[in-house]
Amino acid sequence: MNLILIGPPGAGKGTQAKSICEKFNLCHLSTGDILRNEVLKQTDLGKQAKDIIDKGELVSNEIILEIIKKFISINMNNYKGFLFDGFPRSEDQADMLNNLLEEIKVGISKVILLDVDQSILLQRINKRKEEEGRDDDSEEILKSRLDVYLTQTQPLIDYYSNLKLLEKVDGTMEIIQVNQRINSILEAV
Ligand code: AMP
């Protein structure tokens, strides 16, 4: 089973991803986590990505393709599939993912949209900044990340609806309720 988790910044993708992966033995592929790790280790890739992440913009598709390919080839034999969190973030990236999955002869089972209203996102992001200290969790950067989400990522909702893969989940419910809702969708896959 290969899943994609889509949602605006602060929708709770990371939290849900962790419990879904544990329950269904999936490999959590978070491009944001991988990039933050590269920044922390001060690798060449991390140095290239840092300024872009700090502005809330998208790093290049070339960088994303490189990290995704590497991650998939290292992990593909150890799990029942992947949960893509934070990728794809644009239609070009969705095409990129289709090509990659075609190469390894697997498909996308479901795309879960965590739907959260913009006003709630800001409260959540402020809380996360206090708890995790992420540099890109400031109000100004959130605005830019939201703009990027609305212009580049939101079109994926129609993209995957047309492919009959999209399931919309109300992300404003309690974490446990969101989790139960996702589990029931996935148990039926
Ligand atoms: P996230 O943790 O998914 O919110 O990602 C944090 C930041 O990493 C984003 O604001 C982007 O700058 C960068 N990033 C993560 N995933 C991608 C992606 N698929 N394409 C381009 N940039 C990404």
Image (cartoon, grey):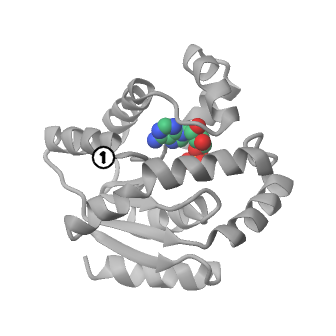
Residue at figure coordinates x 57%, y 33% from the top left: 35
Q: Residue furthest top?
A: 44
Callout 1: CB less than 8 Å from ligand 1: no
Residue at figure coordinates x 60%, y 27% from the top left: 38
Residue sitting nearer the eye, 177 or 20: 177
Question: Taking the image as drawn, is residue 155 in sight?
Answer: yes
Instruction: Note whether 154 is above or below 48 in the view shown.
Output: below
Count of marks overlaid on the render: 1
Q: Residues within 10 Å of mark 1 (few under 14, many from 20)?
A: some
Task: Find residue 107 and report its image quarter.
Answer: bottom left
Residue sitting nearer the eye, 41 or 98: 98
Task: Find residue 103 and report its image quarter.
Answer: top left
Question: Taking the image as drawn, is residue 33 in sight?
Answer: no
Residue at figure coordinates x 81%, y 53% from the top left: 129
Q: Quadrant of the C terminus?
A: bottom left
Q: Quadrant of the N terminus?
A: bottom left
Residue 93, given in percent of the width and then of the height, sits at 34, 41
**5 on left or right of 142:** left
Residue 9, given in percent of the width and then of the height, sits at 61, 56
**12 on left or right of 93:** right
| Residue that numbered label 1 is attached to | 94
Residue at figure coordinates x 67%, y 25% from the top left: 51
The quadrant where ligand 1 appears is top right
Type of the residue with mark 1: Ala
Task: Find residue 41 and report its image quarter.
Answer: top right
Element class at badge 1: helix
Residue 27, given in percent of the width and then of the height, sits at 41, 52
Q: Residue furthest right?
A: 130
Instruction: Note whether 137 is above or below 189 in the view shown.
Output: above
Residue 81, given in percent of the width and then of the height, sits at 31, 55
**54 on left or right of 58:** right
